Amino acid sequence: MHLLFVTSIVPDGSLASGYEIANEAIVDALRRAGVRVTVLGYTWPGRKPADPDETVVLGSVDVRNETASSLQKVRWLADAVRGGLTFSSAKLRIVGAGVLREAIRGAGPVDGYVLNSVQLAGAYEKCFEDRPFLFVAHNVEAQSARENARTAQDAFQRLLFRREAQLLQGLESRLCRKARFVFTLAEEDREALGVASDSRSASLPLVTREIAPSAQSPVEIDCEAAMIGTWTWQPNRVGLTWFLDEIVPHLPAGFRIKIAGSVPAGMASSHPGVTFVGRVPDAHEFVRRAAMVPLISRGGTGVQLKTIETFELGLPSVATSSALRGIAYQPENCVVADDPRQFAAAMVALAAGKPRYVDGRGFHEAQRAALDSRIATGLETLLPVGQEACA
C-alpha cells in the first residue's frame, strides 16, 4: 500500500515542536505496518526534507505569526476572507490547485491519502477528494479556536478567532464525515469530533522517539525546574502566562526556573530565578539537568507531547489535569495539581528531594505497541482500495 502523507510542513529531522514529533511517530508507525509513505507539503525556508527520496516538496513557507510583517499578516487575512478559508489554511495556499495535482501525480500511483491535520487539507480541500483518506486530528481545532477567542488580548483578535472557529467547525465536520477512518491524539477528542464509534476512529498513544530511552544515569542538576516549548502558540502561551502569573509568585526567590523555546514579545517575569534561555541544542539534556519538570497545560485538545517525553525519560514532574489529557498513565514521581499554591508547593517538594527517576522504558514500549495496533485498525479501512494511478 502506498499512501501520501499530506502535511503543512514536511519533516526535516529537527523535531523542534510537538507537532513535528507527533508527525514522525505516526509516519514511523505507518512504515512499521508495511506501508510505503510519501510525504507531501512545504519546507521551512532554508531547510531540506529529512527523507528527500520519499518527500514531495511544494515550496518553502514560514507560517509563523511572530516572524511575519504586518503587511504579510494583512495579505494572509485578505486571502483568507477572499477564499473563505481559515487564516492557517490561507497561509499555505501558495501554489495553484493544478500545481498541487501535478505534484500528487509525480508521487506515483497512490492508494489513498493521510490528511495530517486541517491546515493543508483545508487549503486544497477538493484536491484530495479523488482518493479515500485517513484523517489525523491533532486537536479539535474549532474548540481550540473558541478557547483562543476567550483568552485573546483584544477585540480584533477575538473576532478573528471566532471566525476561525466557525470555519473550522465546518471543515472538521466534512473531513471526519468523508474520511474512511479518523485518528485523534486524545480519547476525548473522538466524541468532540462526532466519531466516537470504534468503527470510525481511534486515539493514537504517541511516543517521542523510535527506540525506548536507556535507563537514566545521574547528571549534574543546574536548576530546580526546566520547561521547553513553542510558547508563541496560543494554548501554550495561556499555560505559560498562568504559570508565571499564578504559580511563580509562590516560589522561593532562590528557586531557579529555566524556560527554553520561542516566547512572545514582552513575556517576562519579575521572579529573580526565572531565566528565558531561547533555543537549546539538546532538549532531552536540557530537561534532564533540572530537578523537576512542570507540565502546565491549561486547556486545549489533543495530547501534550511534553508530558509523554517527560514520562519516557522518567523525570520527576508536577502536572495539571489538562497536561495528562489523553494519557492513561501517571508515574509515581508525577504529582497532579491544578491549584497554583498546591502546584508551587509540589514543585518545591520535588526539587528539594533526591532526583527520583523512574524507568520510562515500559511506558514507551506500551505506548508504541498500542500505537501500532490502532494504526493497523485504521489501515484496514483502506484495504479494498485499488492500485490505479491518481487521475
Image (cartoon, rainbow, N blue to C red):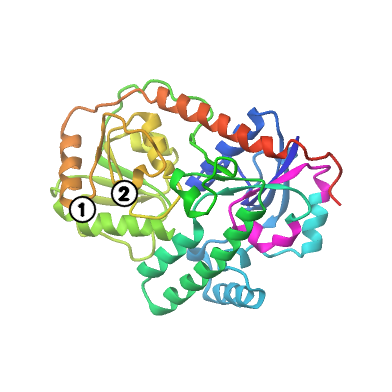
Place of residue 231 in the rendered image (x, y in percent of width and height, measured from the top left): 40, 55
Residue at (40, 49) in percent of width and height: 229
Residue 132 visible in the displayed image:
yes
In this rendering, is residue 36 above or below 97? above
19 left or right, relative to 121: left
In this rendering, is residue 161 above or below 198? below
In which quadrant of the rendered view does residue 350 lie?
top left
Residue 125: in magenta span = yes
Front position in the image: 194 or 24: 194
Which residue is denoted by mark 1 in the rendering?
Answer: 247
Residue 98: in magenta span = no
Check disc 2 and give the amino acid type.
Ile
In this rendering, is residue 76 above or below 219? below
Numbered range of the magenta stretch: 105-127
Q: Which mark is residue 296?
A: 2
Crowd tier of the residue under label 1, counting other residues whose Cα lies within 10 Å: few below 14, some 14–19, many 20 or above: some
176 left or right, relative to 370: right
Residue at (25, 46) in percent of width and height: 257
Residue at (48, 34) in percent of width and height: 207
Counting residues from the start of the chain, the first of labels 2 and 1 encountered is 1
Asked whether disc 2 touches disc 1, contact meaning CB atoms under 8 Å apart, the reply is: yes
